[in-house]
Amino acid sequence: MKQHYSEADLLDTYYTQPGESMPVMMHLAECSECASRYERLERKVRGLAACEHDKPETFWARQRLSIMRKVEDVRKPSIFVRSARYVAAAALVLILGGVVTRREPAKAPQVEQQPITIETHDSTDPWQSEELKDLQPVVAWESWVDDETKKNGDRS
Amino acid sequence: MAAFRWNDPSDAPADRELIDRTLSGDGNAYGVLVERYQRRIYRVAYAIVRDEAEADVVTQDTFVQAYTHLARFQGRSELETWLTRIAINRSRDALRRKKFVSLFIVYNDEEGEVMIEPVDDRPDPERQIMSLQLRVAIQRAERQLSSQQKVIFRLRHYENLSLEEIADHLGLRAGTVRAHLFRAIHKVRRELAAWRSQGGSNEAALQ
């Protein structure tokens, strides 16, 4: 007795891709009855699935126009948005500038200073000689008196 | 807006060229791409959302989103495939929104069905009724599907996409798509069986 596939099996075959349901497809190749039923089923389901896509050209033109307007809005943001961007950028610059100026400069590494000793002994200075060094304060005082006396004499 | 038409298809600039021109600021170039693919994108969107106004919105959103991300399009896939992916994702979002809204709407199962007689080359009234029943069975089954199953079933049923194409668009493995599709078809079959138990005949519906 020849076995035939049910319409439910054929429906499964249709949806889950005919080429991969090999047993069914092999049967359809041999059984003209099932093959014609499958063909009718396929036509029926495709007919059910078909929807109206033949819209008038005005529909597509309107849709295209609408898309391009939205795209234009994305491409050229409004004046308000552009102004807001400039304000935000300026504010950012000010904030960053403030942060930079408030930041203290890094301290330079301190070098330990060595005491500088200057040799004051001058061998050519006659007051440093053993003979005259005791007289140096006296001479310095007299020089000072002399200057003061001069000043007083000028006043008189 | 300028009309973007060529007498010879070979004169039409390639997608890559139009993308480059768009990125360098040529607004008309993107218009050409829109005209080239808007029908295809609308068809995919309509297959999923099953609503003309919604499909129109999805199509527009798809092209705007594609424009904003055009610089990131690497060209690893065809532009059409990339656009289709965006359209499918947008359509899924629309389905989810619709599902959320439907939570607050009392839906009468017997009403609200827009029935259009399917085209039949043999205008037998009884057969037309059977076709109608098949359509109703599919519509009822669709309502029971999850969002993912619905998208997969509709892309297969209405757009006749292969499992591999669906898997590619959704970023799934073919085996996963097959499993979802199998569950969806199982529900269609259950609806058909329920209808048969009410006195109809599947065989007649499918002939």
Image (cartoon, coloured by chain):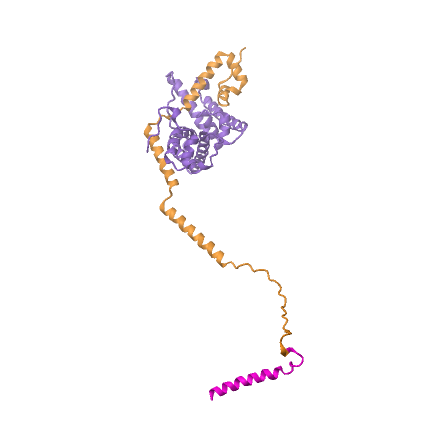
Q: Nearer the viewer, residue A82 or B201?
A: A82
- The percent position of residue B164, horizontal first and vertical second, equals 51, 26
Place residue A111 in its image quadrant: bottom right
Q: Nearer the viewer, residue B135 or B36?
A: B36
Q: Is residue A91 above or below residue B182?
A: below
Q: Which residues are magenta?
A: A128-156
- Magenta highlight on residue A112: no
Place residue B52 in its image quadrant: top left
Which chain is the one coloured orange?
A
Which chain is the one coloured purple?
B
Q: Nearer the viewer, residue A9 or A108?
A: A108
* Location of the C terminus of chain B (image quadrant): top left
Helix, strand or loop for the magenta stretch, by majority: helix
Q: Nearer the viewer, residue A25 or B103?
A: A25
**In screen coordinates, is A115 left or right of A25?**
right
Is residue A136 shown to the viewer in this render? yes
